[in-house]
Amino acid sequence: KVSLSVTGDRLSLAIMDLDANNVAPMTAATVSDLLRTAIFKTGKVEVLERKSMDAIMKEQAFQKAGCSSTECAVEVGRLLNVNGMIMGSINKLGDKYTVNARLIDVEKGNVVLAEAVECNNEGELSASANTLADRISQSIPTVGKVISIVGGGGVVIVNLGLQNNVDVGAKLSVTRIGNVTKDANGKVIFSERIEVGTLEVVEADQEASKAKILDSSQLIQVNDIVGLGL
């Protein structure tokens, strides 16, 4: 599993349009949109819509043309206030197409995952986008937060539910970010992760769940990180 730095209530991603190498720019843009949709449907992360992404970048007068480096993706990710950025390319060599994607942790500024899918013709690019989304999502834990404490503290409400594939009986780990170490440029180079406890979901709605505390090493608090596969 990859670990992305969580700054909001849920993990959030933005997907830049894939670079087109020996393929039509419209093809690359279409596959980029397919990838956004496929990753959103996994329910694991929030995916910034392309229109919202373009509007924010326009407002900030940011020129994304030629933005293909990790450093540029981090800069864009900070503008968009997301945890991760996905960037990559579609390449055609002979009769083969390859769709490449890299997942970048915006806070830490490094690549945490790289995947590539090959296909034999343009008609298979849609399936390739779905395969790529599956591979990326399988490597990302389902992450949310404790949003309230119920009663005497033995039960909590978390912002993960059925739409995130979290149902009754699911076991959720609870962690907390401790000391964070940054370098001279403000880049996070180490963050302490404290294991707090374990929850079991007893009621699940579409966007949130009620969970009982199975065990805890310390008091579970609002904003503690919860998730599957952490």
Image (spheres, rainbow, N blue to C red):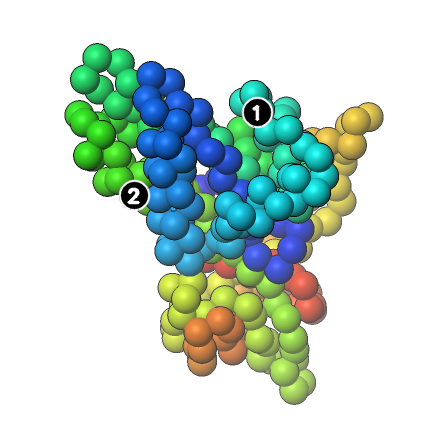
Q: Is residue 49 above or below residue 124?
A: below
- Seen at 35% across and 37% down, the residue is 31
- Seen at 65% across and 77% down, the residue is 149
Task: Give the residue at mark 2.
Answer: 130
Task: Give the residue at mark 1.
Answer: 65
Q: Is residue 39 above or below residue 158?
A: above
State the image coordinates of residue 16 (x, y, percent, origin top left). Answer: 50, 35
State the image coordinates of residue 169 (x, y, percent, origin top left). Answer: 39, 73
Q: Quadrant of residue 225?
A: bottom right
Lower position in the chain sequence, tag 1 or tag 2 = 1
Instruction: Please give left or right for residue 207 compared with residue 98 in the image.
Output: right
Q: Quadrant of residue 35?
A: top left
Mark 1: secondary structure: loop
State the image coordinates of residue 227 (x, y, percent, origin top left). Answer: 51, 58
Q: Out of 59 and 37, give the one closest to the viewer.
A: 59
- Seen at 60% across and 80% down, the residue is 154
Residue at the limit of the structure toward the top, as seen here: 94
* Quadrant in which the N terminus is drawn: top left
Q: CA distance from mark 1 to mark 2?
A: 26 Å
Is the Cβ of the residue at disc 1 closer than 8 Å to that at disc 2?
no
Residue at the limit of the structure toward the bottom, as seen here: 151
State the image coordinates of residue 93 (x, y, percent, origin top left). Answer: 26, 14
Residue neighbourhood size for the residue with mark 2, other residues' Cα within 10 Å, grouped as few (<14), some (14–19), many (≥20) = some
Mark 2: secondary structure: helix
Residue neighbourhood size for the residue with mark 1, other residues' Cα within 10 Å, grouped as few (<14), some (14–19), many (≥20) = few
Q: Out of 215 and 171, give the one closest to the viewer.
A: 171
Q: Can residue 63 be seen in this snapshot?
A: yes
Q: Amino acid at mark 2?
A: Asn
Q: Amino acid at mark 1?
A: Ala
